[in-house]
Image: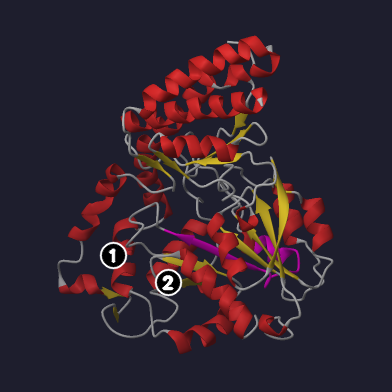
């Protein structure tokens, strides 16, 4: 195969005719395949559904002398706080355990900042003339929508192989209107990047003009390797404290892709001073989250070591799916020179950069052929990818045999979109 950019018009026309026939054949199959979001597969959910066999005896509902069925323990069961602290590498006193969704805790943190201000805020953010927020991109669409929903001005920060462009971040925080940054520090969504030690150090050592500048540290994939051994990762709370910024970071995590997304447990971790402040605000809103489910997770996951053993079973399911996608791209797309893609060893996504100006068209073609992908532009603030290039691939949900069909469709659509652009 020759690279498309090296072909003359006649060769391009011939290739366009061939690929168009291939696309018509795929479209005629009437496929209905979904790779839109990073959902665990049925096989993964079945792997952990035995957790509902727990808690059969009255004593199973008692944790550290606390009846988990009753009111109380706003910050979560002490045992659940210890479990998350073990996984994240922080201290139990810094952990608040919530319901099934870390996104809810993230939204709540931004909402509390907006209505009441954070610990270091001179005033609630709703009384600021303007609030700006840093968004490393490609990034997580739900993060961007949270801050957009409060009317913040979203500022795109380019992602590098080491994490966010720290020169751009350091320049941006000189503006007192810049109140925070979204971060997915390990196996970032969607690039699969692990932030470098230098990036982490520079983030922790920031000297923002805003006294309440906040790092929203979404450590969603902290134990989510699917290839190779577990990668140790710094405790950002400790790194920030050492840099003289103990109150600058809120860390988030959940068991959504460890146990059950619809019935997991989430947490945030922060300085003890931040936690005391947040508890006062949250105590008006809720008496406690679901402690029965917290106890179920404590009994099932036990600790970090035991949880990592479970994650190896997830890896055995996920690894072949990611290899299926990368192998197909290497075989079908790499020789053509029309795209490049990430090769993550953990997380839930593959980030593909198509030929500039072709991502939207490729995704339209996919949809017409029965394959649903994450929408174009979703990985950028306001849903606008300036290069019309990035495509987020989520291989986790379909079985491998369906995934093979879906990625075959994507490859043909990438070719067709590139050929249309080159022939235009």
- Label number found at residue 98: 2
Which residue appears at 73% of the width and 53% of the height? 157
Q: Which mark is residue 6?
A: none
Q: Which residue is mark 1?
A: 296
**Would residue 295 appear left or right of 334 to someone viewing this image?**
left
Q: 9 and 185: which one is in front?
A: 9
User: For the residue carrying disc 2, how many other residues have a C-alpha within 10 Å: few (<14), some (14-19), or many (20+)?
Assistant: many
Count of marks overlaid on the render: 2
**Which x, y percent locates residue 273?**
62, 80
Residue range in magenta is 238-254
Residue 324 in view = no
Instruction: Give the image location of residue 184, x and y in percent.
Output: 59, 53
Tag 2 secondary structure: loop
Q: Nearer the viewer, residue 57 or 335?
A: 335
**Image position of 6 with respect to 165: above or below:** above
Task: Please say whether residue 251 is visible from this viewpoint.
Answer: yes
Q: Earlier in the sequence, mark 2 or mark 1?
A: 2
Relative image position of residue 56 (x, y in whole percent): 15, 66
């Amino acid at each position: 195969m020759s690279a498309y950019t090296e072909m003359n018009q006649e060769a391009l026309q011939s290739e366009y005719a061939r690929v168009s026939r291939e696309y018509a054949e795929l479209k005629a199959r009437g496929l209905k395949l979904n790779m839109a979001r990073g959902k665990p597969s049925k096989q993964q959910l079945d792997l952990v559904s035995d957790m509902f066999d727990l808690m059969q005896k009255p004593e199973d509902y008692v944790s550290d002398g606390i009846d988990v069925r009753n009111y109380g323990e706003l910050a979560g069961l002490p045992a659940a706080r210890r479990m998350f602290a073990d996984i994240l590498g922080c201290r139990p006193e810094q952990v608040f355990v919530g319901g099934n969704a870390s996104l809810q805790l993230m939204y709540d943190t931004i909402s509390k900042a907006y209505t009441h201000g954070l610990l270091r805020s001179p005033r609630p953010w709703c009384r600021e003339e303007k609030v700006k927020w840093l968004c490393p991109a490609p990034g997580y669409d739900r993060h961007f929508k949270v801050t957009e929903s409060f009317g913040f001005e979203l500022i795109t920060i380019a992602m590098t192989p080491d994490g966010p462009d720290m020169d751009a971040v350091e320049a941006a925080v000189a503006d007192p209107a810049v109140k925070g940054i979204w971060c997915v520090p390990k196996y970032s969504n969607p690039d699969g990047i692990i932030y470098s030690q230098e990036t982490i150090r520079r983030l922790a050592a920031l000297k923002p003009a805003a006294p309440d500048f906040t790092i929203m540290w979404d450590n969603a994939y902290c134990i989510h390797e699917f290839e190779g051994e577990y990668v140790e990762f710094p405790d950002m709370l400790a790194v920030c404290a050492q840099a003289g910024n103990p109150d600058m970071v809120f860390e988030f995590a959940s068991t959504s892709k460890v146990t059950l997304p619809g019935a997991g447990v989430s947490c945030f971790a922060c300085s003890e001073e931040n936690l005391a402040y947040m508890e006062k605000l949250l105590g008006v809103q809720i008496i406690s989250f679901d402690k029965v489910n917290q106890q179920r997770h404590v009994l099932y996951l036990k600790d970090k070591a035991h949880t990592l053993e479970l994650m190896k079973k997830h890896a055995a399911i996920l690894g072949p799916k990611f290899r299926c996608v990368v192998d197909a791209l290497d075989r079908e797309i790499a020789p053509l020179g029309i795209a490049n893609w990430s090769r993550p060893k953990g997380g839930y996504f593959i980030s593909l950069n198509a030929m500039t100006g072709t991502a939207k068209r490729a995704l339209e073609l996919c949809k017409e052929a029965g394959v649903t992908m994450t929408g174009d532009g979703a990985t950028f603030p306001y849903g606008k990818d300036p290069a019309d290039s990035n495509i987020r691939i989520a291989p986790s949900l379909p079985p491998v045999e369906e995934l093979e069909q879906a990625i075959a469709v994507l490859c043909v659509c990438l070719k067709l979109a590139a050929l249309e652009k080159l022939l235009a």
